[in-house]
Image (tube, helix red, strand yellow):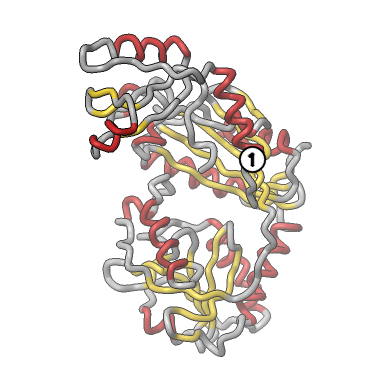
């Protein structure tokens, strides 16, 4: 993510100390360029002084004119970098317990490199949608967030109510009325060791994101993932260890698909890389894989609750959470992905198999409308007003 970079608090004194002490050796000769305190080129204790030497030393590492920046210079470069980047997502506000406040300056939306979430993956996160000035299912996501923190053995720096208040205030400061809130708990900064014992305090971060991409309701294609699924211990925890998820998503994109579907160790349908999956059988039964081995999706659970209305209308004959084979899934009349990012997205094709009649299914679209209505006018249990 864009703000996962070093805080610009590495002092000039520290850099100078490195230059004087680390290079105070007969094997190193500092070379200062006119543009700054950079080293011309250093290779395994040998200073490369010209291009001929560089060509002769095939294993050398070229470092040309790297400036030594002051804190203010580093901040200015961060600002310039942010201004020059064109993104579909805009970052409107960030809270950090490290600096104990909220910033709307994108250049300051950074975290320390020695935070164990960065270099060891010791952190958890969650999200909540912002719709018309309300946070959708904030409390449900916050409960899961704290459960994940407990599983990851991270003791939050604040109590639940304080974290909740911080999240709401961050959205308020952003002035964002439609977007998303994402937040993290990490073991905190401290050192580059494996154990978090050197971390004096866990850290809380939150950021408000406004996505400028148009909302797409069109049906999509998915493939079966060849990337191994996480073990239940880690799959049920929303940690920042998302490399399997990323590789699974990349595999889908390489096959002109939207997502890759994971199967569990018994071959049953599990989940997507960052969403749940559900099916409507030919008997008009809504079936969703159980949550014992996968992430307990807040949006998926809300869909199950809202689907009861479709049963009363006769559009569904049953709702079931349980095991589902790939064969059963591909024979279903409808297939959908469910999550806070996609909401309810129709799936038209899985691998080479067309789902149903190859069109967006009526139950899938009905569930999407129910979720959208719930986000806009649902009960106070799922909609938290933001005081702008």
Asked whether residue 256 is in view, the answer is yes
Residue drawn at 56 percent across, 28 percent down: 96
Depth check, front residue: 113 or 170: 113
The residue at which mark 1 appears reads as 84
User: On screen, 225 above or below 31?
Assistant: below
Left or right position of 338 against 352? right
Check the image and report above or below for 263 versus 10: below
Q: Tell me the SS state at disc 1.
A: helix
Q: What residue is shown at x 52% (from left), y 30% (from top)? A: 159
Q: Residue 132 location, x and y as percent?
A: 76, 51
Q: Quadrant of the C terminus?
A: top right
Given residues 103 and 230, the one toward you in this image is 103
* Residue 143 x %, y %: 51, 44
Q: Position of residue 89 (x, y in %)?
A: 64, 49
Residue 166 or residue 54, whichever sits in front? 54
Q: Toward which corner of the image does residue 225 lie, by quadrant?
A: bottom left
Residue 213: x, y in percent?
Answer: 67, 58
């Amino acid at each position: 993510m864009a703000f996962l970079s070093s805080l610009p608090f590495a002092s000039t004194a520290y850099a100078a100390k490195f230059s004087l002490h680390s290079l105070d050796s007969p094997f190193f000769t500092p070379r200062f360029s006119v543009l700054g305190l950079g080293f011309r080129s250093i290779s395994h204790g040998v200073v490369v002084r010209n291009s001929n030497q560089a060509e002769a030393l095939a294993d050398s590492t070229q470092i040309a004119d790297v400036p030594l920046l002051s804190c203010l210079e580093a901040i200015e470069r961060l600002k310039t970098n942010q201004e020059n980047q064109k993104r579909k997502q805009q970052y409107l506000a960030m809270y950090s317990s490290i600096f104990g406040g909220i910033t709307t300056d994108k250049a300051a939306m950074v975290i320390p490199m020695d935070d164990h979430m960065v270099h060891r993956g010791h952190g958890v996160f969650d999200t909540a949608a912002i719709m018309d000035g309300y946070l959708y299912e904030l409390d449900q996501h916050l409960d899961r967030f704290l459960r994940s923190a407990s599983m990851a053995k991270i003791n939050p720096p604040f109590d639940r109510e304080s974290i909740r208040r911080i999240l709401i205030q961050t959205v308020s400061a952003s002035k964002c009325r439609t977007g998303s809130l994402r937040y993290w708990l990490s073991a905190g900064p401290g050192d580059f060791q494996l154990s978090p014992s050197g971390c004096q305090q866990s850290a809380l971060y939150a950021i408000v994101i406004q996505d400028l991409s148009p909302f797409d309701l069109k049906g999509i294609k998915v493939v079966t993932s060849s990337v191994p699924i996480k073990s239940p211990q880690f799959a049920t925890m929303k940690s920042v260890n998302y490399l399997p998820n990323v590789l699974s998503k990349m595999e889908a994109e390489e096959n002109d698909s939207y997502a890759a579907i994971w199967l569990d160790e018994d071959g049953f349908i599990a989940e997507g890389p960052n969403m749940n999956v559900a099916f409507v059988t030919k008997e008009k039964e809504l079936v969703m894989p159980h949550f014992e081995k996968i992430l307990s999706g807040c949006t998926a659970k809300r869909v199950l609750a809202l689907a009861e209305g479709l049963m009363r209308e006769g559009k569904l004959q049953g709702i079931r959470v349980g095991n589902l084979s790939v064969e059963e899934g591909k024979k279903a009349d409808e297939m959908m992905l469910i999550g806070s990012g996609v909401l309810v997205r129709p799936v038209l094709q899985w691998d080479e198999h067309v789902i149903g009649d190859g069109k967006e299914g009526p139950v899938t679209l009905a569930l999407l409308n129910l979720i959208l209505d719930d986000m806009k006018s649902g009960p106070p249990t799922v909609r938290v007003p933001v005081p702008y």
